[in-house]
Image: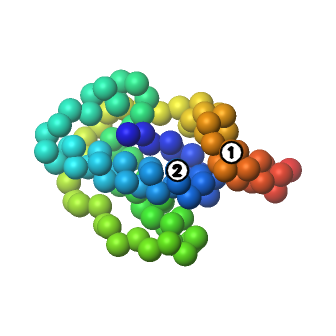
Amino acid sequence: MRMWGVNPALLCDKHLLGEHVEMHMFVGALKKGISTRGYEETGLVVLSKIRARHDALAAEMQRRGMNHRSPLPRIAMRRGGWIDEAANLRELKRRCPDCRKRIRRHDRRRS
């Protein structure tokens, strides 16, 4: 599980949907009392940002014409964790050709 934390418009459909599911998985783990400590300590999640991240991902899904019918359950979010958005952006470009294209297109528009 991972919170990429980058602009959702930069994610390919696969990573967009994947991260959305993973926000639900984090909430499910927290509800069940399952430890997220390993994710927090290795820079894979910021617990206090799960809800905002989910909402941003859902908005991008809807912008792309995808259905979103899975509101995030209400739970008390605790603090903890960190992510390095710049490193995650580099990793997405390295790992995924579709994300790389979206990121390059976005960078060209900003120039």
Nearest the viewer among 91 and 78 is 91
Give the mark, 1 or 2, whose residue is nearer the N terminus: 2
Q: Nearer the viewer, mark 1 or mark 2?
A: 1
Left or right of 104? Residue 111 is right
Nearest the viewer among 61 and 54 is 61
> Would you call the spot at circle 2 few (<14 residues within 10 Å), some (14-19), or many (20 or more)?
some
Q: Residue at x 63, y 42 (%)?
A: 96
> Would you call the spot at circle 1 few (<14 residues within 10 Å), some (14-19), or many (20 or more)?
few
Q: Which residue is mark 1?
A: 97
Q: Which residue is mark 2?
A: 15
Q: Residue at x 40, y 24 (%)?
A: 42
Disc 1 to disc 2, how far (Cα)? 11 Å
Secondary element at tag 1: helix
Q: Amino acid at mark 1?
A: Pro
Query: Residue 48: x percent and y percent?
Result: 34, 44
Q: Amino acid at mark 2?
A: His
Query: Residue 82: x percent and y percent?
Result: 42, 32
